[in-house]
Amino acid sequence: MSDSGTRSAAVRSGAELLHRMVGGDGEAAINALLDGFESRHPGVSLEDVTDENLSLTVKSRILKESPPDVWIEWPGKNLMPYVEADVLADISETWTDSDMERAYLDGPRNAAAFDGAYHAVPLNIHRINNLFYNVDLAAQAGVDPSRVSSPRGFVEMLQQVEAETGRVGMLLPMKNPWTVLQLWETVLLGEHGHEVYQSVADGAAASHRGAIADALDIVSEYADLATDDALYVSLTDANERFIDGESVFFHQGDWAAGAYTETDGFEYGSDWEHVPFPGTEGMYAMNMDAVIASETTDADAVETFLRYVGSPDGQRRFNRKKGSIPPRTDVSMGEFTDFLQDQHANFGSSRAQPLSITHGLGVRPEQLIELKTAMSSFVADRDVDAAASGLVTAFDRQ
């Protein structure tokens, strides 16, 4: 545990908040949120505690019967062990007695609800199915990224880019297996559709083994066209190399764009752009954080904080600093970057908001460990059949 402080000299007891948002945009975002809460609710004391081993600390404190009042964690299936242990507060009234149900789309709502009861308030959304591209290099290669309709068809575009420009089509950081798992799930979504994607995540992977293997094969083709050092390239390194013009394309979550907006002479719309990854048009694949509540001795303080977290003001303050978009569709976006304004518009018009597998929303924690292990082996040996078997086993372990 690295830091602790009471945000307000309150007139009554309050609540304890645990989170791991230390440094960078995360720290700026949580400070903006808590400053806003304090200004709106000066009579509520909120103890702000940071912990880099958050999940372990929360589980340990639950076992000791002294859980934190609220903490920030991935929602979705990541919360299933807590739900099954019956240690989370039912905050359904927070949703139904406010305008939150109306303002949230199905995807974020579904990530917060279990068996008809709400147990979380989604705080932000990061999109993972972005395909960023260098505008000048795409024009030089004679390609239109918006016109490729499938992940497999994208292979031909990458080959054309290399032939026309002599540059790598798409950088592929493989140093950490999560980046490859994220690419694989995006390819599965784009090549085989949302219904298959959801069925796989819900434990019917064995019946879709062919689709799982096909998506792995496509990822392997991307790897064949990547740089020779891809196995040793990190996400940060790849992002910097994309900015430097080493590749035409880069697939990543929208957090990668934070580096673009901070780079002088690299302007959105004229120097870099983005489209949904081929085949995923109309879908907003999501990673998100949410505020989770345990049973607490000061339910009023927790309720007040949850309502603020789910309010337009709270979400505007947090997401503007975080470089993400609000899960509410009615937040004023005037203070956000042009890129995030476009992302929010795409979110509002999306027909589906699938929960990310790689980031723990679409699978249980123990499954995610197995999935990363299977992908780590795939990165090392590129054995599609063995990796497909490993992924099927992990997904079907419900």
Image (cartoon, helix red, strand yellow):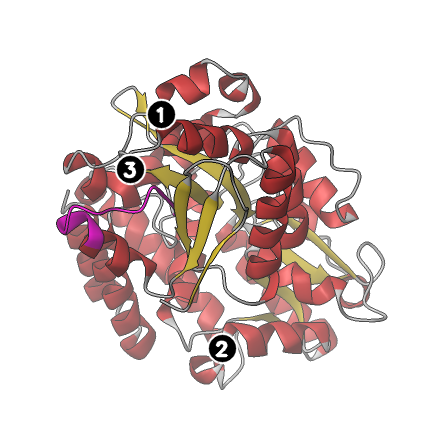
Q: Label 1, label 3: how many angstroms apart (C-alpha)?
A: 10 Å
Dot label at residue 294: 3
Secondary structure at badge 2 equals loop
Region of the chain picked out in magenta, as a range: 61-73
Query: Badge 3 local density, few (<14 within 10 Å), some, or many (20+)?
Result: many
The quadrant in which the C terminus is found is: top left
Left or right of residue 284, residue 392 in this image: left
**Would you identify the image quadrant in which residue 272 lies?**
bottom right
Q: Position of residue 395 (x, y in %)?
A: 21, 48
Mark closer to the chain start, 2 or 1: 1
Residue at figure coordinates x 49%, y 59% from the top left? 21
Instruction: Give the residue type that dot 2 points to.
Output: Ser
As displayed, is residue 112 above or below residue 258? above
- Front in this rendered view, residue 328 or 67: 67
Instruction: Give the residue type that dot 3 points to.
Output: Ser
As displayed, is residue 312 above or below residue 139? above
Q: Which residue is mark 1?
A: 91
Q: Marks 2 and 1: which is nearer the front? A: 1
